[in-house]
Image (cartoon, rainbow, N blue to C red):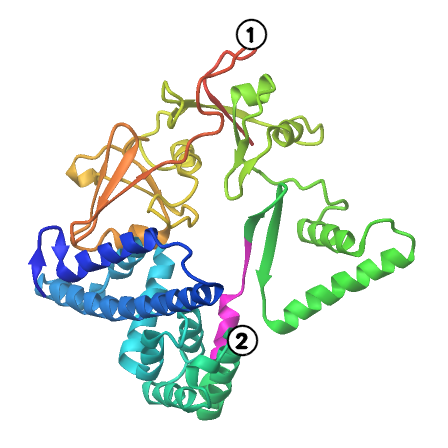
Amino acid sequence: MKRSTGGTEELLALRSWSRALAGLGPSGSDADQVDLLRELERLKSAAAAAQARITVAFDRSQRRAQRDAGVPERRVGQGIAAQVALARGDSPSKGARHLGHAHALVEEMPHTLAALTRGDLTELRSTLVVRETACLSRPDRSRVDAELAARPGGYAALGDVTAAAETRRIAYRLDPHAFTARSSRAVADRRVSIRPAPETMAIVSGLLPVVQGVAVHAALSRHADSLRSGGDSRSRGQIMADTLVERVTGQTTAPAVPVEVHLVMSAETLLDGDPAAAHVPGYGPVPAPFARDWIRDTDAQVWLRRLFTAPAGERLVAMESNRRCFTGLLRRFVVLRDQVCRTPWCDAPVRHVDHPTPAGAGGETSAVNAQGLCEACNYAKEAPGWRTRARADGLLETTTPTGHRHRSRAPTPPGAGPPRVSRAEISFRDLVLAC
């Protein structure tokens, strides 16, 4: 592989193709358009196969380098998935999945990799096949790979649902004990999560064993049917949602939920009717009228705390705390400022507050020298070759072992920009944290 200015010949060729694709537009008849769509889809599949091969080669090379550097065997491999994630613009958890998927394709499933290379299989379908064979031994996984390829029409005849179902069927036949054990272990992954929904709503979902999940839904359904038959004017779905909140929180009515919810807004939004959105950590922006109504709720206990921004209002810089460690108010401030993990594209909740410039290297325990990270990213940066630098303007620059640099900045605070002050009550600058 020859190296030229700006990268290898292969890298320069790929950049040339990317520029060519950027200028690709409609051409020829409708039949030609369909052919273009088909070839572009095949190109995406071939690119996914190439990424898998390159990912495995990169992993092997990094592991050799770590061993040569004297890294303890138990730590060999640390930080590699994070580098894959950064290269692909994904979260570290997805980077780990990309890494495992690549090894399965390259080392255990040659027919699947070949189909992906030819464009007979999409990346999503290859992921489904790999996922459904994860419980199998290497020989059994290779047998599933061969049987799927030998089906009439091969991989090209499989849709997403069919690919997953057929893979599960063969996997269960080859090793029913492993397949059953995997289902049993899945119980350990039970959890409850929340994600934003449109129109200032939220989706709270529970991943439960099937028996428990069915039981929860059945109980809510029976209760809703009972109230509806008694004349309750709410819809069946509304009753089920309200009942879920009441039973989980222990309240007699759904609106009265005594939990602490942080709400960050500008002083203008709170006191002067400014339309700038507020922010709820873990959810995202909410309309200003909703935020003001929540603060004015006579049944709620509200505490206000001042936060301060830079002169231009583009970032949080201080809080009413002189503590010198990432606990208490200072930690809360960093979590509110960063909102999610500071690693680009991660978006996971902040679990650790860390020094970009280590304390051992003279880094201060301060809001400037602080970054909110998820657990995986905090551990990844401890691998050899990783460096992070915090700048006074709030920019964080992370350098990976290969020398690639990635920059991140904390999200813009609510109401950032020129202040619009017209009432004497606004005597502080710039944000309010309501609890």
Q: Which mark is residue 161?
A: 2
Q: Residues within 10 Å of mark 2 (few under 14, many from 20)?
A: few
Residue sitting at x 80%, y 64%: 222
Q: How many marks?
A: 2
Q: Decide which of tag 2 and tag 1 comes sooner along the chain.
A: 2
Q: Nearer the viewer, residue 93 or 113?
A: 113
Q: Main secondary structure of the magenta part?
A: helix
Q: Amino acid at mark 1?
A: Ala
Confirm whether residue 104 shows in the render: no
Q: Image quadrant of residue 175?
A: bottom left
Residue sitting at x 52%, y 12%: 421
Magenta span of residues: 182-193
Q: Position of residue 184 (x, y in %)?
A: 51, 78
**Real-space CA distance between mark 2 and mark 1, rounded to the nearest whole angstrom:** 62 Å
Q: Nearer the viewer, mark 2 or mark 1?
A: 2
Residue under numbered circle 1: 424
Q: Position of residue 418 (x, y in %)?
A: 44, 17
Q: Is residue 84 left or right of residue 267?
A: left
